[in-house]
Amino acid sequence: MTPKAVYWDMDGTLIDSEPLHEESLVSALRSVGVEPPADLHARVVGQAARPVYEVLRDQFGLGLEFDDWINLKYDHYMGRAPNLLPRDGAMEIFRDLKAKGVVQAIVSNSDRMVVEANLKAVGVHEPTMKTISRNDVRNGKPDPEPYLRAAYLTGIAAADTAVMEDSVPGAMAGVAAGMRTIFWPQDKIEGPAGALVAHSAEEVRALLGLD
């Protein structure tokens, strides 16, 4: 059965932006003399900017203050964001849900400026759609607060909602919020307990009652 509302994670789920996040992370680190390990992005994917910064500071010796670090990373990211594309199959799902009258929202662990740049890049212009960024909540994912905030703003009960996520922290947040959580990872990784795993857009569509 199609839910009354679907809340989309943005990076890696609706938009294929994780490669640019990784590129920006690596470029910023190398510019200050820190050589990141090959698996760094996989270790921090889905986390908000400050927890990632704390990992870089505590484990890799990053000597910058947080504001200086995030400005350095975003200098690289924002100039390339206009070239971003949707994840394969995601925008078709988004449009089909819209056609069925399903309420949709964006719930991201990224900062507001990144959310707005990414949505603009892929042509998502929905004046009444709710968008929740890391700047809008006290606690980011895996805490359920971002998804509970979306439920509050849309006025739709958690039981009538589906969450779309590609990262473990994000899926944990959806499950903790009491929402049907579809875990659609880019790689074949195990999802958190309580999440429904989909390995293709077709499987996502089936779980959302679109086929």
Image (tube, rainbow, N blue to C red):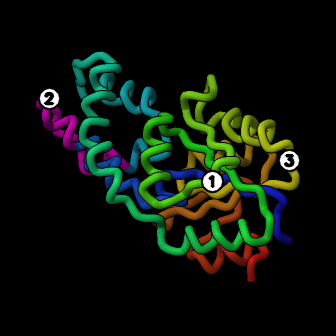
Of badges 3 and 1, nearer the viewer stands 1
**Mark 3 is on which residue type?**
Ile
What separation in Å lies between label 2 and label 3 (alpha carbons)?
Answer: 46 Å
Query: Does 34 lie within the magenta span?
Result: yes
Query: Does 206 lie within the magenta span?
Result: no
Q: In this view, does 122 lie to the left or right of 135?
A: left
Residue 167 place in picture, x, y as percent? 53, 52
* Marks 2 and 3, the one that precedes in the sequence: 2
Q: In the image shown, does 27 or 76 lie closer to the viewer?
A: 76
What separation in Å lies between label 3 and label 1 (alpha carbons)?
Answer: 18 Å
**Mark 1 is on which residue type?**
Glu
Residue 175 place in picture, x, y as percent? 73, 48
Of badges 2 and 1, nearer the viewer stands 1
Q: Read off the residue under disc 3.
A: 156
Q: Is residue 195 left or right of residue 82?
A: right
What range is drawn magenta here? 27-41
| Residue at x-position 59% and y-position 46% | 170
**Placement of the C terminus among the 4 image quadrants:** bottom right
**Image quadrant in which you'd find residue 140:** top right
Q: Read off the residue under disc 1.
A: 126
| Residue at x-position 55% and y-position 32% | 134
Q: In the image shown, does 32 or 17 lie closer to the viewer?
A: 17
Q: Read off the residue under disc 2.
A: 32
What separation in Å lies between label 2 and label 1 (alpha carbons)?
Answer: 39 Å
Q: In this view, does 17 lie to the left or right of 116?
A: left
Q: In the image shown, does 24 or 55 lie closer to the viewer?
A: 24
Q: Is residue 9 above or below residue 47?
A: below
Please, what secondary structure does the residue beneath circle 1 have? loop
